[in-house]
Structures are given as structure tokens and as C-alpha cells.
């Protein structure tokens, strides 16, 4: 079913919404709007992306009419790692509100259902604006090639089609709520909520892909900046600055 942007605009009359049937990546359009001075909370949403970007140079599978693909321009005073964690929490909250599903989060912000990814978040700093790119697998019934083993959708998990419009409204509401916590109360409550929501923060045997080096160890909490602590097999404690975390074995 195609995205009902008219209903969306009616339900969010105060939100600056830029909708595209097809776009390369919502990240570029959101960055362009940020440069033009758009308001915080401005959202770019597309029914399909032809060059969806993932983290660490990956692409994001952005099939027409099945997923939710958006970028939100945020103007926040906070450092990026806690913003990244807050966006993961906001996505989990929106999925729960829409479907009753309880997702896990693999640090920093892979949103998982039964160990398969149902949503991914790409956070970029563009001049002074944060561009929060979120992709949620909503109504896909299958995934191509290698993705089949590692991806799932809300439809596959619940057995029924989900409203992308309701999910987007819940997501924008929860992004506002978590950003408000960050701005008004600081990083600490976000780190606490993330530690509670993510099974990966403490006591998980993981492998961390650092490009040239693979680190193996047990996760040991978050540092005050929101980075992941790893008690590695070599006896050293590492601060993990970027993703590439996966379960060991
Ligand atoms: C990840 O690799 O987990 C992050 C995926 C982020 C995908 C979203 S879809 C909307 C926005 N536009 C993009 O090109 N990427 C992000």
C-alpha cells in the first residue's frame, strides 16, 4: 500500500514534512534542508530509496512501499554518542507503541527482534545539525540474498501488516520525548535507559570488528560518554568507539 502522506500531514499539522515517492537517500535531502536553516524536527520521508545508506559504508535495502525511510534534522547541544543511543531508544519505544513488540538494541543502535535486525539508525553531523536517518523494516515479507539470514520486519514478527503512518507518528513523538530528556536532564538518564533496554551493554560475549583487528571479549557497560566498554580476552579493557559488534559464537 502506498504511503498516505495526506493523512500524515493532517495528523501532524505543525511538522515540516518533505515526502518523496522515490529519492536517492533521505540523508542528502535532510542535509540540504539543514543548510537552508530548516527548523529542528524537519523530516524527510520516502516511499523508496535508490541509494539508501547504512553505517560503515553499507547500503540500506529500501524496497518500495514496505519500509519506513526517514531522516530528521535535529538541532541539539548534546554530543553525538548519547544522541545516537537516544534515537535507538526512541525507535524501540515507537515499535512497542505500534506493535507491542519488545526489541533489543545492539550497541550503538541496531534494533533487533529475535536477534535479527528490524531497524537501523545512521547519525551524521552536518555542520551544526544532526541528521538522524532511520530505516525500519515494516511490511517486508522476505529479504533478498544474504539479508534473509540477518534481517526481519515487523510484519514477519507479528504476522500482520503494520501501518507505516502510525509508526512514523509514534516515532516522531518518541524522538521528541527522548531528545527533550537529553536536553533537559543530560546524558545520564539516556545511558541508564539504554543499559536497561539493550542486552548487549553488559555481560555479552562479543566480537568487535575494528577493521584490521577483531577484538573478542565480554561487554562491561557504557562509559560516561556512551561508548561501549569491552573486557577483552587479552586482559585489557577497551573503549569501543564505533560499531561492528556481533555476538561471539
Ligand atoms: C544501519 O546501517 O544500520 C543504518 C541504516 C540507516 C538507514 C536509513 S533509511 C533512511 C535514512 N536514509 C538513508 O540513506 N539511510 C537512513
Image (cartoon, rainbow, N blue to C red):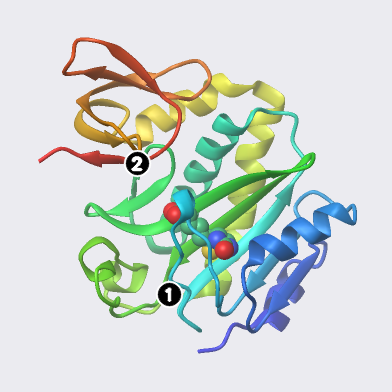
- Compared to residue 115, the image places residue 20 above or below, namely below
- Compared to residue 104, the image places residue 64 above or below, namely below
Mark 2 lies on a secondary structure that is: loop
Residue holding disc 2: 244
Left or right of 192 in this view: 128: right
Q: Are marks 2 and 1 in contact (CB under 8 Å)?
A: no
- Compared to residue 223, the image places residue 155 above or below, namely below
Q: Position of residue 40 (x, y in %)?
A: 79, 48
User: As drawn, which residue projects farthest toward the right?
Assistant: 36
The answer to whether residue 209 is seen in the rendering is yes
Q: Position of residue 219 (x, y in %)?
A: 27, 24
Residue holding disc 1: 162
Specify the label residue 27 is tagged with: none
State which quarter of the image contains the C terminus.
top left
Task: Count numbered badges in the picture.
Answer: 2
Q: Residue at 39% of width from left, 77% of height from top?
A: 139
| Few, some or many residues within 10 Å of mark 1 (<14, 14–19, 20+) | some
| Few, some or many residues within 10 Å of mark 2 (<14, 14–19, 20+) | some
- Compared to residue 110, the image places residue 204 above or below, namely above
Relative depth, front residue between 80 and 192: 80
Q: Residue at 59% of width from left, 82% of height from top?
A: 3
Mark closer to the observer (2, 1): 2
Q: Position of residue 62 (x, y in %)?
A: 48, 74
Mark 1 lies on a secondary structure that is: loop
Q: Residue at 65% of width from left, 28% of height from top?
A: 79
Amino acid at each position: 500500500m502506498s504511503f498516505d502522506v495526506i493523512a500524515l500531514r493532517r495528523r501532524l499539522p505543525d511538522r515540516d514534512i518533505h515526502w518523496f515517492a522515490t529519492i536517492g537517500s533521505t540523508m542528502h535531502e535532510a542535509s540540504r534542508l539543514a543548510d537552508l536553516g530548516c527548523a529542528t524536527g524537519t523530516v524527510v520521508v520516502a516511499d523508496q530509496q535508490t541509494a539508501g545508506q547504512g553505517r560503515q559504508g553499507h547500503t540500506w535495502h529500501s524496497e518500495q512501499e514496505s519500509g519506513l525511510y526517514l531522516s530528521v534534522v535535529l538541532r541539539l547541544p548534546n554530543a553525538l554518542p548519547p544522541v545516537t543511543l537516544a534515537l535507538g531508544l526512541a525507535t524501540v519505544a515507537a515499535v512497542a507503541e505500534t506493535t507491542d513488540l519488545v526489541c533489543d538494541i545492539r550497541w550503538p543502535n541496531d534494533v533487533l527482534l529475535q536477534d535479527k535486525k528490524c531497524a537501523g539508525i545512521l547519525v551524521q553531523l552536518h555542520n551544526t545539525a544532526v541528521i538522524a536517518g532511520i530505516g525500519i523494516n515494516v511490511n517486508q515479507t522476505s529479504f533478498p540474498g544474504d539479508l534473509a539470514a540477518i534481517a526481519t520486519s515487523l510484519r514477519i514478527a507479528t504476522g500482520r501488516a503494520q501501518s507505516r503512518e502510525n509508526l512514523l507518528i509514534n516515532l516522531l513523538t518518541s524522538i521528541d520525548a527522548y531528545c527533550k530528556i537529553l536536553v533537559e536532564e543530560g546524558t545520564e538518564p539516556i545511558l541508564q535507559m539504554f543499559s536497561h533496554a539493550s542486552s548487549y551493554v553488559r555481560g555479552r560475549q562479543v566480537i568487535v570488528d575494528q577493521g584490521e583487528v577483531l577484538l573478542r571479549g565480554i561487554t562491561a557497560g557504557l562509559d560516561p560518554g556512551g561508548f561501549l566498554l569491552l573486557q577483552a580476552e587479552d586482559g585489557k579493557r577497551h573503549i569501543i568507539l564505533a560499531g561492528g559488534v556481533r555476538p561471539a559464537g
